[in-house]
Amino acid sequence: MSNLDTAKAMIAAYNAQDVDTYVSYMTDEACEANYRGAVVREGKEGTRSGLAAAFAKWPQNRAEIVEAQAIGDYVLMREHVTRGPATDGSDQVEPFDVVAVYSFEGGKCSRVEFIR
């Protein structure tokens, strides 16, 4: 499976809210972070628990791939994210676009950085 195919499979798992499949594409030490900034979810287990919490809060959460390309060990994707109503009664998040940079090592995703 190419890195691009893996990143697309991660988004398919994300949209199905299947955290186990999503993290199966990641290295054990993988993380999700803001671009050049703070780590948001650390390690495979931190990503699993963080996404599970997000999906519980926003059960209609989805990311649509607008553009995607592979460059060496990286995949760049522009994604359009919609959250839907939150289960905790908080204000609805307006849909937003994000550029996600997926880094790969040995066929697995080692880091995802979000530019928003």
Image (cartoon, grey):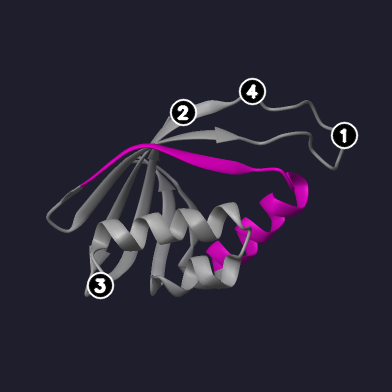
The magenta segment is 46-69
- SS label for mark 2: strand
Q: In the rendered image, which residue does mark 3 sit on?
A: 107
Question: Mark 3 to mark 2: distance in Å?
Answer: 26 Å
Q: Is residue 79 above or below residue 59?
A: above
Q: Are marks 4 and 2 in contact (CB under 8 Å)?
A: no
Question: Mark 4 to mark 3: distance in Å?
Answer: 34 Å
Which label sits on residue 89?
A: 1
Q: Is residue 56 above or below residue 95?
A: below
Q: In the rendered image, which residue does mark 4 sit on?
A: 94
Q: Earlier in the sequence, mark 4 or mark 3?
A: 4
Where, by quadrant of the figure, is residue 116 drawn?
top left
- SS label for mark 3: loop
Determine whether, in the image, residue 23 is placed left or right of residue 55. left
Q: Are marks 1 and 4 in contact (CB under 8 Å)?
A: no
Residue drawn 86% across and 41% down?
A: 88
Question: Mark 1 to mark 2: distance in Å?
Answer: 23 Å
Query: Could you tell me residue 41's position as x and y percent?
Result: 51, 57
Farthest residue toward the left? Answer: 72
